[in-house]
């Protein structure tokens, strides 16, 4: 039950009560830029006054923390882990916030309607009461990771054009994706989405890695550009392997390779294609090129 305060090269480790008093009074904390609060069950709210210089805040295993207020104005990283009673975040997060990570906040229902315009990374894991996300993500967002959110039904209608990495997995209630993915996307993982019935018609041509797994209601894949370096498709319906891209597979591969040779555009990395069916006892992979 300690607060760890990193002040550049100096680390202060003290008992929680003493540190809370110091945080409340502002004594000896004026230069703190990193703060970690861990395993303090008496914490229901943050101290009224946190150091204004604080840029990184980690809150872990505060089992009775209900809400967050009074976040410092210069905060850039906010990491909240295993706070099962946390109901809400502030309506307005600090404008400077770049990274937001929420893990095992079981009672968190929603995020603020407007996220900070500088946000680069948003990771949400095991927030099983989360029903909705903001209608619009900030244009700065580069990485979006959502896992184990049982009640999440809907995503925003569009993703920002800056997004390069998207992971959506273990979302049993999600029924719909946006109609298109941004062309900036490089890494895409769609995994264990049992209620999803449709994928976008096309995937971005810049994809470096694509993983599609355990989406049983999907019968057809969109066109997949052969520039993707690694494609993994497994635990899906048999019909998905007869989609246009995979029809007559061996001839398709030979034709693609011939076109690459003729155009002088053979990729520097081999394209790897893994396809697993649900009822294979011994799962095998196939590498092309």
Image: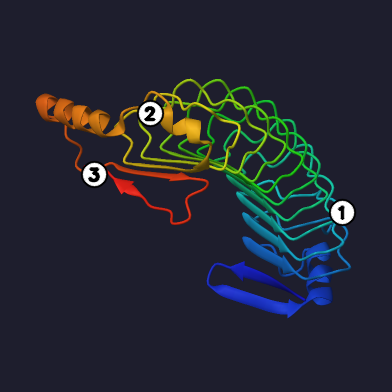
Relative to 202, does residue 67 appear above or below in the rendering?
A: below
Colouring method of the image? rainbow
For label 3, the SS is loop
Residue 287 on image: x %, y %:
28, 46
Q: Which mark is residue 66?
A: 1
Residue 32 visible in rendering: no
Q: Judge from the rendering whether residue 144 lies leftward or rightward of residue 152; answer left or right.
A: left
In terms of depth relative to the viewer, which is nearer, 60 or 170?
170
In terms of depth relative to the viewer, which is nearer, 202 or 114?
202
Q: Judge from the rendering whether residue 251 lies leftward or rightward of residue 130; answer left or right.
A: left
Q: Residue at x 60, y 68 (%)?
A: 7
Q: Which residue is mark 3?
A: 270
Q: Residue at x 61, y 69 (%)?
A: 6
For label 2, the SS is loop
Q: Which residue is mark 2?
A: 224
Instruction: Tell me the CA gap for discs 3 and 2.
Output: 16 Å
Instruction: Tell me the CA gap for discs 1 and 3.
Output: 50 Å
Residue 207 on image: x %, y %:
38, 35
For label 1, the SS is loop
Instruction: Tell me the CA gap for discs 1 and 2.
Output: 45 Å
Residue 268 on image: x %, y %:
19, 42
Judge the density around disc 2: few (<14), some (14-19), many (≥20) Cα neighbours within 10 Å. Answer: some
Q: Judge from the rendering whether residue 130 lies leftward or rightward of residue 202; answer left or right.
A: right
Relative to 6, does residue 245 appear above or below in the rendering?
A: above
In terms of depth relative to the viewer, which is nearer, 147 or 216?
216
């Amino acid at each position: 039950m300690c607060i760890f305060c990193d002040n550049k090269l100096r680390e202060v480790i003290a008992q929680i009560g003493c540190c809370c008093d110091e945080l409340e009074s502002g004594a000896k904390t004026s230069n703190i830029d990193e703060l970690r609060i861990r395993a303090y069950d008496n914490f229901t709210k943050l101290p009224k006054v946190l150091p204004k210089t604080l840029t990184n805040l980690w809150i872990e295993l505060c089992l009775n923390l209900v809400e967050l207020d009074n976040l410092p104005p210069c905060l850039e990283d906010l990491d909240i882990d295993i706070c099962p009673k946390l109901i809400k975040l502030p309506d307005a997060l600090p404008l400077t916030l770049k990274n937001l990570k929420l893990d095992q906040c079981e009672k968190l229902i929603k995020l603020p309607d407007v996220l900070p315009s500088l946000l680069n990374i948003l990771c949400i894991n095991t927030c099983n009461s989360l029903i909705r996300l903001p209608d619009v993500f900030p244009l700065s967002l580069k990485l979006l990771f959502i896992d184990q959110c049982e009640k999440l039904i809907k995503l925003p209608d569009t993703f920002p054009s800056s997004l390069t990495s998207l992971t959506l997995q273990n979302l049993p209630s999600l029924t719909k994706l946006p109609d298109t993915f941004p062309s900036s996307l490089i890494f895409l993982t769609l995994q264990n989405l049992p209620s999803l019935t449709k994928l976008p018609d096309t995937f971005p041509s810049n994809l470096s890695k694509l993983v599609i797994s355990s989406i049983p209601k999907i019968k057809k894949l969109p066109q997949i550009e052969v520039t993707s370096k690694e494609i993994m498709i497994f635990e899906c319906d048999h019909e998905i392997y007869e989609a246009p891209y995979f029809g007559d597979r061996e001839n398709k591969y030979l034709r693609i390779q011939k076109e690459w040779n003729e155009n002088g555009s053979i990729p520097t990395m081999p394209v790897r294609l893994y396809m697993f069916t649900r009822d294979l006892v011994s799962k095998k992979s196939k590498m092309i090129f």
